Amino acid sequence: MNLPGRARNGLNGVARELLRQPAVEKPRRQWVDDVVAWCHQHDIDLATRINGKTLRFDAALLAQIDDVLESARIAPLGRSLSGLTSSAQAKEGVEEDKATRESPRARRILVSFPPQPIAGLASEPRTIRDVDVQALKLSAFSALIQVENLDSFYEFSLDISALSGYINPLVVYRGDSHYGGGFALLAEAWRKTHRPHIYAGDFDVKGVTLALDSGATHLLLPDIEWLTQHATSLHVPAEQFPYQRRLRKHLAALPSAHPLREYLTLLLEKQRGLRQQWFGGEMGCIALS
């Protein structure tokens, strides 16, 4: 029987209390009963420390518990497995806590780089890499391009005149349940660089809202004339209506001559949008504020 996580947390709290006093009594409920069951299984005699209502902890009892943990090659008290990767947990002992470990993709993102020839692999227009956010040197990139849809990310090309002024832009998939956490870390780190963050995604209420929430500075969109001709009410799903209030407030706060006003008016007043996969015409970077 492994020492349950809540029991370990409770014992760690007791250890801190014992720094200030010789003994600590805890009521027999929740994690304390887990400790009692674990001690009985490992032949730790609670003797006079226990009664029907409480369990008394002292330094000697915690030392016995630590001895058992050490002999079983399990992390001692005072060490938390929470937030550690599986490999980091393995260094603490043989116990694995999947419920609190860091997800293997917690810091991973999908990045599209210029072609990188690899022996045995057919050449492709772009090289897609799964990388750790912490491995990126952000100073090497002049702009961050966040691509909302995975299929558009795989096909994304920098052969767009609106992007020609950026040297070595960092093209990253926005993420989903697998990569969303890693991108959030990147977006927060990128915000501190004060360099352009371009959102390439759906022209709909949710897409623009996601761009704002992620700290994007620009939207990559077709010019307004082309978009006005091709946008459709079919690409403005009813489930996105709750997001409109946020965008209406954003629209109201924009200067009268701001180029984003025409886009938001098309989206909010005419209720017409267009998914990224249908984009065409001349593309431009439209400031979000």
Image (cartoon, rainbow, N blue to C red):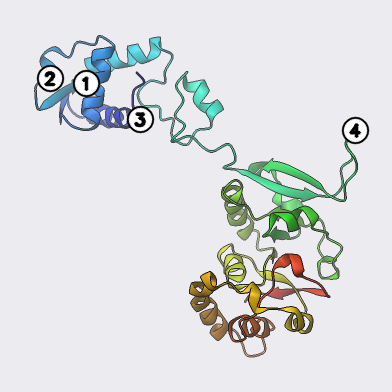
Q: Could you tell which of marks 4 and 1 lies nearer the N-terminus? A: 1
Q: Quadrant of residue 268?
A: bottom right
Whole-angstrom CA distance, mark 4 to mark 3, is 47 Å
Q: Please report contact status of discs 4 and 1: CB closer than 8 Å, yes or no.
A: no
Which residue position is annotated with label 1? Answer: 36
Mark 4 → mark 1, Cα distance in angstroms:
59 Å
Determine contact: label 2, label 1, CB under 8 Å: yes
| Residue 22 in sight here | no
Name which quarter of the figure residue 215 lies in. bottom right
**Mark 2 or 3 closer to N-term?**
3
- In screen coordinates, is 94 left or right of 207? left
Residue at numbered disc 3: 5
The amino acid marked with disc number 1 is: Val
Instruction: Please report the residue visible at 75 percent of the width from the left and 79 percent of the height from the top.
Output: 230
Circle 3 — which element?
helix
Please give the label number shown on residue 119.
4
How many angstroms separate mark 3 from mark 1 (CA)? 14 Å
